[in-house]
Image (cartoon, rainbow, N blue to C red):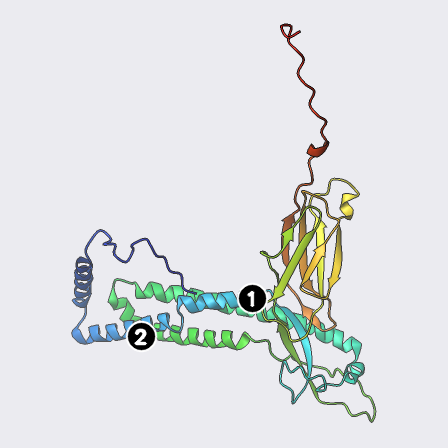
Amino acid sequence: MNFQVSGLGLDNMKLDCPPSFLDQEEEAEEAEDQQLLEPEAWRTYVERRNALREFLTSDLSPHLLRRHHARMDLLRKCSYYIEILPKHLALGDQNPLALPSAVFQLIDPWKFQRMKKLGTAQTKIQLLLLGDLLEQLDHGRSELDALLESPDPRPFLAGWGLVEQRLADLAAVMDSFLAMMVPGRLHIKHRLVSDVGATKVPHIRLMLSTKMPVVFDRKASVAHQDWVSLRWFVTIQPAAAEQFELRFKLLDPRTQQERTQCGAIPVAACTVAVRNLLPNRSYRFTVKRAESYTLVYEPWRDSLTLQTRPGPPEGPAPGRLGKLSPPLPTPSER
């Protein structure tokens, strides 16, 4: 994402001194640094400094790190499921004939619930490791950036061996981070299918799969006097229709009866109208996918607070007001 600021005249601003003077000042500083080293050492310093700068602007650029942070925020909001697949089928294949439903009847329910707990633990660990790797990349970038800005070239050359090792370590961290971004195969220690005699059981594998977060459309969700119209969406629209669950709750109820202003509504679409609400009150709404047998981890759900519009003013309506009586005559008029 590129942010551009126009109309401020920054491109033409002199910054209190002409560019030629700034160039002369930088050249003077570079000449002063060059005097600290022999010509051969200076060439080595320039080459290594350029190599470090190239690494920071390509392999570990701020733009790349911002993208990784955005992807991590997305992964923390995803829903995670166990997907049961034949070994020859690719992850995400929607072919209903690929795995007969009879296989689910052969799976031991107790073992499957145990595998779901393992899937939950594996997902949590994977997210924690990804967050730790991203912190290492941020910290490594800060360290190398500070080293690049060091005014004395001699410590830079003396510690170049450590710098090379640091570059290799950060490259390995980046490789590990990218490899862990996609949920992988579950580590199975026990068979899910019990002995079924002569029944032929297909070879199956378990994978962790993700579904994109369900997010409210804040522009299309509108509150009226005693009802609200809500709309949500999924970042990547699924191939099949999904079931959702909407929850609502009145904030700060004032009476025992108002405490009943809450509930859960099953929805088979991405829009719903919630009626019979109180006017001029705040409600909180949350949306998520309906519970699924294969769900293992759902750490986040979107919430939205809306305030209904005020009701009509108390007292008689303006159209029903009686006619005004004429003013009483003054003594002179009598």
* Along the viewing direction, whichever of 110 and 61 lies nearer the viewer: 61
Residue 98: quadrant of the picture: bottom right
In the image, what residue occupies the spot 19% across and 62% down?
Answer: 23
Q: Nearer the viewer, mark 1 or mark 2?
A: 1
Q: Are marks 1 and 2 in contact (CB under 8 Å)?
A: no
Where is residue 257? Give x, y as percent.
Answer: 79, 43
Task: Give the residue drawn at x 75%, y 57%.
Answer: 264
Mark 1, Cα crowd under 10 Å, few <14 / some 14-19 / many 20+, is few
Q: Residue furthest right?
A: 197
Question: Within the image, what quadrant is residue 53 found in?
Answer: bottom left
* Residue at image mark 2: 51
Image position of 248 (left or right of 142): right
Quadrant containing the C terminus in the rendered view: top right
Nearer to me, 234 or 222: 222
Residue 265 lies, in percent from the top left, at 75, 59
- Residue 196 lies, with reference to residue 155, above or below; the image says below
Say which element carries label 1: helix
Give the left or right position of residue 132, taking residue 300 as reference.
left
Which amino acid type is marked by label 2? Ala
Q: For residue 304, say whether it is visible.
A: yes
The amino acid on which the numbered mark 1 sits, given as a three-letter code, is Leu
159 displayed left or right of 241:
left
User: Which circle's residue, 1 or 2, is located before the other in the chain?
Assistant: 2
Residue beneath disc 1: 74
Image spot of residue 213 (x, y percent): 61, 66
Rendered view: 238 above or below 226: below
